[in-house]
C-alpha cells in the first residue's frame, strides 16, 4: 500500500497544476494561430483580482454567508474573468493585426499595466475571505486506488481543465477547423489562398485563448490560492509562457509541463520541511531555475549533441521530444493585400 | 480625398504623436472620476506637489531620474540591436548587490579607506556584476536557445531572491529585522549628495556621460553601425560578416554594466544600505521609457524625467488621496500603450502608399 500522504501530495499536484494548465492551453491556442499574447502575467493578475471581486460582490448582493462554496457568485467571477482575458487578447490582436504594431511591445506594456491596475483596483479587497469553488468528488470513481484521489476527487474546475486538454487536442489534430487553426499559424498565405479567413480566425482564436487565460487567473483566486493580495500570483504568467514553448506548442505536452511544474513545487515543499535550516527564499528559486532548465533542454544545441551518446532505444523518442519548432508564422502579421 | 487634405496633412502629421498621449490622459481622468472621491485635478495636483513641492522633493525627482536614465541609455543599445533586454531589472539589482558587497565587506571594516577609493571600486564592481548578469542572459540566448525575454524574467526573479537571501541571512544586520535590509553603510561608502536629499551630482554626471557616449557610439562608430544592422535585419547583418552572437553578447553586457551602475547609485546615494526592494520597477520603467521614446535619445532623456516625476509624485498621491501608489504606474503604462497603438501616423492612415516605394525599387 502506498502511504496516504504520498497520495495526498499526488492529488494536490493535479489540483495545483490545473489553473496553470488552463493558461497554457489558452496561450497554446493563441500562439498556434500565430499571435503572441505576452501579457499573460498581467492578464492573470487582473483576472484573479476581478474574478475574486466579482464573486465576492455577487455573494454580498445575494446575501449569502462569506467563505463558503457558492455556485452563482463563483460562476459570475469566472465568466467576468474570462471575458476580461478575452478583451485583453483582442486588444493585442487588434494592435498587431489591424494596426500592424509590434505585438511583443504591446503585450509587454500590458503585462506591466494590467498588474498595476490589478493592485490599484483590488486595493480594497486584499486579504478578505470570499467564495470558492466547491469540492466535488465523483462517486465510485474517486474510490479507485491512486488514480481516484488524483483525478476524481477534485472540483469541477479541475475536471473541466482535464477534459479541455483532451478536447483541444482532438480539435487541433483530428478536425478540419483544427487543421485550419494550425495552418493559419504555419502558412497563413496558403491558408488564405484556400479560402480560410486568416485574420478573422486569428481574432477568434486569440480571444478564445485569452478567455481561458482569464479563467486561469480567476481559478487561482477562487480555488487554488484563495482571495486577493498585491501581486497575488505574480510570475505565474511567465512560467505559463515558458511551458508553452517547452510543450512544443502542443496542448497535451503543455499540460504535462504544467504537471511537471506542480511536481517540482511539491518536491520543493517537501525539501523545505526536511531542511528547515535553509532559508525559505532559496526554495523560491527552484521554479525559475526549472524554467531556465526546461527552456535550455528544448532550446540548446548541446542537448541534441547528447542524443547519439544515449542508449539506442532511447535515441528516437528523445530526438522526437526535443525536435520542436514554433509555428512558422508566430508573431508575423498577415496582410491580405500583400 | 488626397487633394482636399494635402495641405492639412503635414500639420496633422507633425502634431500626431501627441494625440495618443492626450487620449490616454483623458481615459485616465475618466477612470479617476469613477474610482476616486477626489477630483482628478486634486490627484494630479498631489502628483505635482509630490514631485516639485519644494527643493527637497525636486532634487529627489532628479535623483530618481538618474537610474532611470542609466537603464534607459543601456536599453537604447540593446533595442538598437533588436534585443528585448527585460533582464535590466535584475542587472540593476546585481549591481546594487555588488556595490553593497564593497560597502559592507571592504568599506565598513576599513574606515580609514577614503571614499575616493571606495566609490570607484563600488562602481566598478557593480558594473561588472550587472554586465555578468546580462552576459548570462545573452549566452542563454545565443548558446542555449532561450529567448532573452524568458532568460531576463527568470534572472530578474533570481536576482530578487538573491537580495532576499542576502538580507535575511549573511548580510542580516546584528539587530535582526529579517526583511528590512542590511545595516546602514559607513560614510566612506556613500556618494556625496546635496543637502539631505538623495541627489548626487557625481551620479548625475555619470548618467549624462553614459548617455552622451551611447549617442556618439550609435551615430558615429562602426560598432553602432553593426548593432543597427543586427537590429534591422539580422540575416543581412550575418551575411555582411557581423557576428550576431558576439554583438548580441556585447550589447547586452554594455546595457548590463549601465544597469549595474544604476543599481550602485540606488544603494550608495538613495538608500545608504541595501533594502529588500532595490529597484522598485525602475528597470521595467526604463523599458517603457525607451518604447515611448521610440529609441530616440533626446526623447528618452525628456520622458525619463517626466516618468521620474510621476514616480516621485505617486507616493504623495497615496498620502493625500489614499489611492494605491500604483497609480503612477497606470499613467505611465497607459501613455506607452496608447503611443504604441496609435502613435504611428503612417501605419494608421496611409497603409498602402508607404508600401509602394519598397516594391518599386
Image: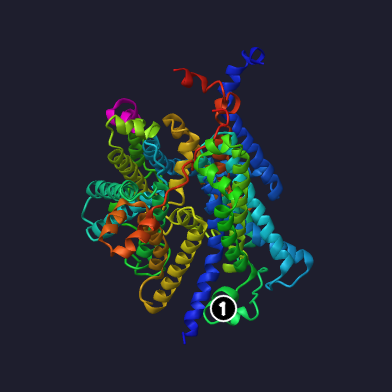
Asked if residue B126 is positioned above or below residue A98 in the image, the reply reads below
Residue at 60%, 56% (x, y): give it. Answer: A212
Question: Label 1: how many residues lie within 10 Å, few (<14), some (14-19) or many (20+)?
Answer: some
- Asked whether, in this view, residue A236 is left or right of residue A300, the answer is right
Please state which of residues B65 and B95 is positioned toward the viewer in this rendering: B95
When asked about the image quadrant of residue A232, the answer is bottom right
Quadrant holding the C terminus of chain A: top right
Asked if residue B31 is positioned above or below residue B165 in the image, the reply reads: above
Q: Position of residue B309 (x, y in %)?
A: 51, 41
Residue at position x 49%, y 77% in the image = A9
Left or right, residue A109 beside residue A127: left
Check disc 1 and report its element: helix, strand or loop: helix
Is residue B274 toward the left or the right of residue B14 in the image?
A: left
Q: Main secondary structure of the magenta part?
A: helix
Residue B225 sits inside the magenta stretch: yes
User: Residue B104 vs residue A53: left or right?
Assistant: left
The magenta stretch is: B215-227
Q: Measuring from the top left, give residue A191's x and y in whole percent.
A: 56, 39
Residue B166 point in image, percent of width and height: 35, 63
Q: Residue at x 47, y 80 (%)?
A: A6
Task: Work out which residue is located at the far right of the displayed protein and give it.
Answer: A62
Quarter of the view holding residue A18: bottom right
Q: Position of residue A203 (x, y in %)?
A: 62, 43
Dot 1: chain letter: A
The answer to whether residue A49 is above or below residue B135 is: below
Which residue is depicted at the point 39% across and 63% down?
A: A285
Can residue A170 be seen in this snapshot?
yes
Residue reaching furthest to the bottom: A1
Of A196 and B146, which appears nearest the observer? A196
Q: Which residue is mark 1?
A: A148
Relative to the observer, which residue lies in front, A234 or A158? A158
Amino acid at each position: 500500500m502506498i502511504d496516504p500522504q504520498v497520495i495526498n501530495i499526488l492529488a494536490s499536484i493535479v489540483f495545483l497544476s490545473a489553473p496553470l494548465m488552463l493558461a497554457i492551453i489558452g496561450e497554446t491556442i493563441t500562439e498556434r494561430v500565430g499571435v503572441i499574447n505576452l501579457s499573460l502575467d498581467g492578464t492573470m493578475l487582473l483576472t484573479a483580482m476581478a474574478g475574486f471581486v466579482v464573486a465576492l460582490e455577487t455573494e454580498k448582493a445575494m446575501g449569502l454567508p462569506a467563505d463558503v462554496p457558492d455556485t452563482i457568485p463563483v460562476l459570475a467571477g469566472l465568466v467576468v474573468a474570462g471575458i476580461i482575458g478575452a478583451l485583453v487578447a483582442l486588444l493585442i490582436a487588434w494592435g498587431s493585426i489591424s494596426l500592424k504594431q509590434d505585438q511583443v511591445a504591446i503585450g509587454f506594456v500590458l503585462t506591466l499595466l494590467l498588474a498595476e491596475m490589478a493592485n490599484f483596483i483590488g486595493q480594497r479587497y486584499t486579504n478578505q475571505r470570499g467564495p470558492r469553488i466547491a469540492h466535488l468528488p465523483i462517486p465510485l470513481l474517486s474510490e479507485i486506488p491512486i488514480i481516484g484521489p488524483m483525478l476524481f476527487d477534485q472540483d469541477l474546475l479541475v475536471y473541466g481543465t482535464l477534459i479541455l486538454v483532451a478536447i483541444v487536442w482532438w480539435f487541433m489534430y483530428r478536425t478540419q477547423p483544427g487543421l485550419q487553426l494550425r495552418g493559419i499559424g504555419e502558412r497563413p498565405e496558403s491558408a488564405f489562398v484556400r479560402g480560410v479567413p486568416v485574420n478573422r480566425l486569428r481574432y477568434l482564436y486569440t480571444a478564445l485563448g485569452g478567455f481561458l487565460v482569464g479563467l486561469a487567473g480567476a481559478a487561482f483566486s477562487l480555488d487554488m490560492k484563495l482571495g486577493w493580495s498585491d501581486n497575488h500570483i505574480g510570475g505565474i504568467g511567465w512560467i505559463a509562457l515558458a511551458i508553452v514553448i517547452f510543450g512544443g506548442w502542443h496542448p497535451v505536452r503543455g499540460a504535462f509541463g504544467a504537471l511537471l511544474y506542480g511536481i517540482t513545487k511539491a518536491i520543493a515543499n517537501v525539501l523545505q520541511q526536511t531542511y528547515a535550516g535553509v532559508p525559505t527564499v532559496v526554495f523560491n528559486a527552484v521554479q525559475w531555475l526549472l524554467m531556465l532548465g526546461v527552456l535550455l533542454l528544448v532550446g540548446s544545441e548541446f542537448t541534441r549533441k547528447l542524443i547519439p551518446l544515449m542508449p539506442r532505444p532511447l535515441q528516437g523518442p528523445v530526438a522526437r521530444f526535443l525536435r520542436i519548432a514554433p509555428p512558422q508564422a508566430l508573431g508575423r502579421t498577415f496582410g491580405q493585400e500583400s | 480625398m488626397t487633394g482636399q487634405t494635402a495641405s492639412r496633412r503635414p500639420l496633422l502629421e507633425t502634431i500626431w504623436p501627441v494625440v495618443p498621449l492626450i487620449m490616454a490622459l483623458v481615459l485616465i481622468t475618466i477612470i479617476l472620476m469613477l474610482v476616486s472621491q477626489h477630483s482628478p485635478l486634486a490627484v494630479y495636483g498631489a502628483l505635482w506637489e509630490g514631485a516639485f513641492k519644494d527643493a527637497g522633493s525636486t532634487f529627489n525627482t532628479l535623483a530618481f531620474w538618474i537610474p532611470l536614465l542609466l537603464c534607459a541609455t543601456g536599453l537604447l543599445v540593446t533595442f538598437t540591436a533588436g534585443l528585448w533586454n527585460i533582464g535590466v531589472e535584475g542587472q540593476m539589482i546585481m549591481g546594487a548587490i555588488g556595490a553593497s558587497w564593497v560597502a559592507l565587506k571592504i568599506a565598513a571594516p576599513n574606515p580609514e579607506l577614503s571614499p575616493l577609493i571606495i566609490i570607484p571600486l563600488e562602481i566598478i564592481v557593480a558594473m561588472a556584476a550587472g554586465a555578468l548578469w546580462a552576459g548570462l542572459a545573452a549566452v542563454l540566448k545565443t548558446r542555449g536557445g532561450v529567448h532573452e525575454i524568458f532568460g531576463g524574467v527568470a534572472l530578474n526573479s533570481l536576482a530578487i531572491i538573491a537580495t532576499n537571501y542576502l538580507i535575511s541571512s549573511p548580510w542580516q544586520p546584528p539587530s535582526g529585522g529579517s526583511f528590512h535590509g542590511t545595516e546602514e553603510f559607513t560614510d566612506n561608502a556613500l556618494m556625496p549628495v546635496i543637502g539631505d536629499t538623495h541627489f548626487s551630482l557625481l551620479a548625475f554626471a555619470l548618467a549624462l556621460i553614459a548617455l552622451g557616449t551611447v549617442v556618439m557610439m550609435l551615430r558615429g562608430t562602426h560598432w553602432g553601425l553593426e548593432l543597427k544592422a543586427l537590429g534591422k535585419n539580422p540575416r543581412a547583418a550575418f551575411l555582411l560578416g557581423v557576428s550576431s552572437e558576439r554583438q548580441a553578447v556585447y550589447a547586452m553586457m554594455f546595457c548590463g554594466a549601465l544597469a549595474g551602475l544604476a543599481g550602485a547609485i540606488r544603494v550608495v546615494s538613495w538608500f545608504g544600505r541595501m533594502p529588500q526592494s532595490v529597484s522598485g520597477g525602475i528597470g521595467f520603467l526604463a523599458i517603457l521609457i525607451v518604447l515611448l521614446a521610440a529609441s530616440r535619445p533626446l526623447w528618452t532623456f525628456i520622458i525619463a524625467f517626466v516618468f521620474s516625476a510621476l514616480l516621485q509624485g505617486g507616493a504623495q498621491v497615496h498620502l493625500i488621496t489614499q489611492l494605491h501608489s500604483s497609480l503612477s504606474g497606470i499613467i505611465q503604462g497607459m501613455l506607452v500603450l496608447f503611443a504604441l497603438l496609435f502613435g504611428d501616423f503612417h501605419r494608421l492612415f496611409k497603409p498602402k502608399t508607404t508600401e509602394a516605394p519598397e516594391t518599386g525599387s
